[in-house]
Structure formats: structure tokens, C-alpha cells
Image (cartoon, rainbow, N blue to C red):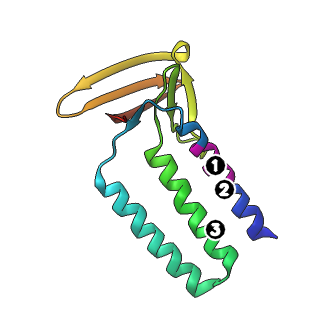
Amino acid sequence: MLKIIVLLMLIIPTIYNFTIHRKNIINVKKKPIFGVIIAIFAIFASLLCYRLDNTIVGYAIVVASVLLIYTISFYPGIRKDGFNVFMGGNPFLKYVSFKDLSDLSLKEDNNLNLIIKAYGSTYKSNLCYRK
């Protein structure tokens, strides 16, 4: 029963992040090292599940946790009416409308760096346009 509750706690934010991501016009651009770190986490979690649990629900928890980390890392972005950002307080991506921003700045070097200040937190990211 506890495994089912943990699985639901991982699946619900993942599904929410998937649905909110569909409204993004511009996505966050992450370095490839983040994908490597998520892959290493997936392998480590799978091995841990194999050694300690070895049940279908355990492997479902591993898949759900990897997908949740992936959605938190790669799914923030810009919508036409605001931003989807991960503020760090919970696993859900947070929608910040343009009127809720306290500060917004762009820095341009090799990439376009966006700095958003809203709800007392600062969010920094690199942007790439998704066609």
C-alpha cells in the first residue's frame, strides 16, 4: 500500500508537468551533462530496486522518479501568457504570469540567459526556441 502511495506521489506531478509543458513556446536549454546525470540516476535506482525490492511496483516507482526528475529539469519554458518555472519548493512546475513578475532580465552571450524574479525567488535558465 505504501508503494502505491509513493507511486502516486511521483506520477501526479509528472503528469501535471507533461500537460503544462505543452503550452510552452520556448523551452529551457540544458547542458548535456544533465541528461548524463539523469541516466546515471536511472541506472543506480534500477540497480537499487533490483537488489532490494525486485517487484513491478518498485520498477514503476523508479520509472516515475526518473520521469519526474526529467520533467523538472527540461520542461520549464516561456508561454505566450507567462512562464513555467521550477522554483524548488515542490515538484510541480509553477506558472508565473507576466503581471506577477517582480524583475525580468536577459543576458546575451553565446546563449540567451533569462533571469526571472517572482514570488520571492530567482529563476535562471538558458533558452532555446522550439519549432
Residue 13, image x and y in percent?
A: 64, 48
Residue 94 horizontal side relative to residue 80, left or right: right
Q: Quarter of the image for the C terminus: give it.
A: top left
Residue 45, image x and y in percent?
A: 52, 73
In the rendered structure, are the residues bearing label 2 and label 1 in contact, judged by CB atoms less than 8 Å apart? yes
Residue 7 horizontal side relative to residue 103, left or right: right
Tell me the kind of residue under disc 2: Ile
Residue that lies at the very extreme toward the left in this rendered image: 110
Q: Residues within 10 Å of mark 3 (few under 14, many from 20)?
A: many
Residue at 29% in and 49% down: 31
User: Which secondary structure, mark 2?
Assistant: helix
Q: Is residue 43 above or below residue 122?
A: below
Q: Is residue 112 above or below residue 92?
A: above
As drawn, the label of residue 11 is 2
Front one among 121 and 75? 75
Is 88 a magenta residue? no
Tell me the kind of residue under disc 3: Ile
User: Which secondary structure, mark 1?
Assistant: helix
User: Which secondary structure, mark 3?
Assistant: helix
Q: Which residues are magenta?
A: 11-18
The image quadrant of residue 116 is top left
As drawn, the label of residue 61 is 3
Residue that lies at the very extreme toward the bottom in this rendered image: 51
